[in-house]
Amino acid sequence: MKQRLLACWRLLRELTTDDAYERYLEHHAATHGDAAPLDRRTFFVREQQRKWEGVNRCC
Amino acid sequence: MKKILWSLVALIGAFALGGIALQRGESINAMWIVVAAICVYSLGYRFYSAWVAARVLSVDPTRATPATRLNNGRDFVPTNRWIVFGHHFAAIAGPGPLVGPTLAAQFGYLPGTLWILVGAVLGGCVQDMVILFMSTRRNGRSLGQMARDELGPVGGYAAIVGALMIMVILIAVLGLVVVNAMKNSPWASSTVFATIPIAILMGFYLRNLRPGRVLETSLIGVALLLFGVVAGGWIDAHPTLREWFNLDGPHLAGFVIGYGFIAAVLPVWLLLAPRDYLSTFLKLGVVVLLAIAVITMHPHLKMPAVTQFVDGTGPIFGGKMFPFLFITIACGAISGFHALISSGTTPKLIGSEADIRMVGYGSMMLESIVAIMAMIAATLLDPGVFFAINSGPGVVGATKDAAVATITSWGFPVTVDQMDSLAREMGETTLFARTGGAPSLAVGMASIFSSAFGRGLLALWYHFAIMFEAVFILTTIDAGTRVGRFMVQDAIGHVWQRFGATSWYPSVLISSALVVSGWGYFLYIGVIDPNGGINILWPLFGIANQLLAGIALCVATGIIVKQGKLRYAWVTGAPLAWLAIVTTTAAWQKVTSPDVRIGFLSAADQLADKFAAGTLSAQQAAVAPQLIFNQRLDAALAIILTCILWIVIADMLRISWRVSKGLPVLPTSEAPAVTATPALEAR
């Protein structure tokens, strides 16, 4: 039961992009481990800017 | 065993559909429609979408998707299919599937319901899935780029011009819906205004206090919004405060126009992004709530299956069922706009080609279910009440007595007392002539919500529903204006490079102003139109949206033919043919019909004659020249849109002909196949 709830919580976080920074850190560590990652705020600001550069909402 | 199960689903579906179609009693239970819809969607998904994916598209789960090949941890990210499904659904579902069915309910519940079901299963879902697949195979290229790569420059430019035009008309018509919902309603206006400071607050919180904590910020925002709905009631009860928010149409239109401009030039984190989180949460919440309420309450539909208005005399919009039903309900059945999303962010998240069916076909099915819910919410009202809310004063008469007399004479009895007490229950001063679909949908939603979750809160539920629709619409206005701005900057950037830099402020201001004045013009004319404006703008929006779907289906058909699968070309070719017939007939009638309620030109001529003869009242005469010019402009627009569609169809047919004759055509723009490896799939 607890496992299930945790899985739901993770899904919800991923769905709302609440865990985007953790995912970024993971990806960063795996691919460019040598360079320092962006801090949370810089990452978030950059992500938000990128997401709104195209058609992302419909009628 | 499985065969027996699916035969059972088919049988139940056929039985429910037959039950709906043959029902001739007083009223019908909404569950018939829900059951029929679920059976039709299940069959469509299990069999048709699987067949299209396997045979027509040759979906190959072993082939690496761009998300795995180009994984950069940002826009190209292989993502769990349920997450992609959620993102894609949140992106395609807007106010369209709520408004269209509500307006089309004037024909009765049956025509709209059947079109939503058939249109989605054979048209809309197929379009979304096919375009998503094709864009995934082309590294997530946009519809315009695919049109240029596969058909040629003509198709490419037509797609871009079409997308810009639809954006302008879409924003205008949605702006009109929200203005009509807030008109002279202090409660609704103050609640909707409150969403702006709430979004700004969230923006600061999300950027500076707790960067990136989307969940908690959204929960705070939703709580504040709900408080805003309650506080709107207090403002409404306060004698001085209520006057501040008691605004008429033109003022509200000015506000929406100013808001659209400011939102398009402000940085996204301040207003746009936080508002988007809010509206996405509300959207999903309300869809779930509505589904629970409809299933637990299973209300009776009071609207007849088919009304006399299929003959073209309908009060909400003029025109016969064919072709106007099919352009009035666009989102929910087939919506060309989705092709822009299916060829935008979503293909870059697809982790395996096997997910495309669920994301593309499945999300559209869910949107179609939303449209069915909206149809149920509109038709459970007394038809007399429904028509009193949705008919403009130009159609049923300017006074309450005139309106109820006209509507009762159609065979839908309604009284002034009934309307007044309903308005009181909903916390409004009047519900007469609240055109645009949002208020009647809110009344319908408030009735089911309050019966499912506690009576006595009708007024709160009503204003919650209005706020919900407004938040939705304002998000589309923000996002649409910004997208339009990018398109204008890109187009002018070809001639003057500096202008194309999306962050150069003079360019941002000028291009935003251009886009806003485009839709602002149509919105303003819609607001001053005595017939409510929606009857002019919504058909134009429908034509534009179906035109975009036509372009998307042309690109898809062209690609299928180029791959040597001519025998399957009907999968996208048949919906394309239907849309071409529907939009062309609708545009033709909108331009040439002698009936002033349908034809733009005859309406302009009639008004011009009256104006010249001096038979108009001073108030009417003041706006007559603008209305006359606008009707002629609308006629020109309808012609241009139809021409664009036929140019792209001709281009697609030219390519298909060359393929069949073995003549050279543009090479495929598909990215070369790479086999997916476990290493690539790992994150």
Image: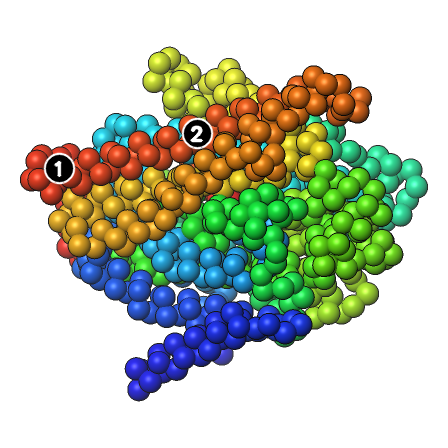
Instruction: Judge left or right: residue B457 versus residue B92.
Output: right
Of helix, strand and loop, which one carries label 1? helix
Q: CA distance from mark 2 to mark 1?
A: 28 Å
Left or right of A4: which side holds B228? Answer: right
Residue A45 point in image, percent of width and height: 49, 37
Q: Residue at x 92, y 41 (%)?
A: B239
Query: Which image quadrant is residue B487 in?
Result: top left
* Element on which disc 2 rests: helix
Residues beneath discs 2 and 1 located on the same chain: yes
Residue type (three-letter) at the residue carrying disc 1: Arg
Amino acid type at mark 2: Ile
Quick check: B647 above or below B325? Answer: above
**Residue A15 rendering spot, x and y as whole percentages:** 46, 56
Quarter of the figure that contains the C terminus of chain B: bottom left
Which chain hosts label 2?
B
Residue B540 percent across, percent down from the top left: 52, 36
The residue identified by callout 2 is B639
Indicate whether B399 appears above or below B571: above
The residue that mark 1 highlights is: B658
**Residue B82 occupies quadrant:** bottom left
Q: Is residue B58 visible?
A: yes
Q: How many marks?
A: 2
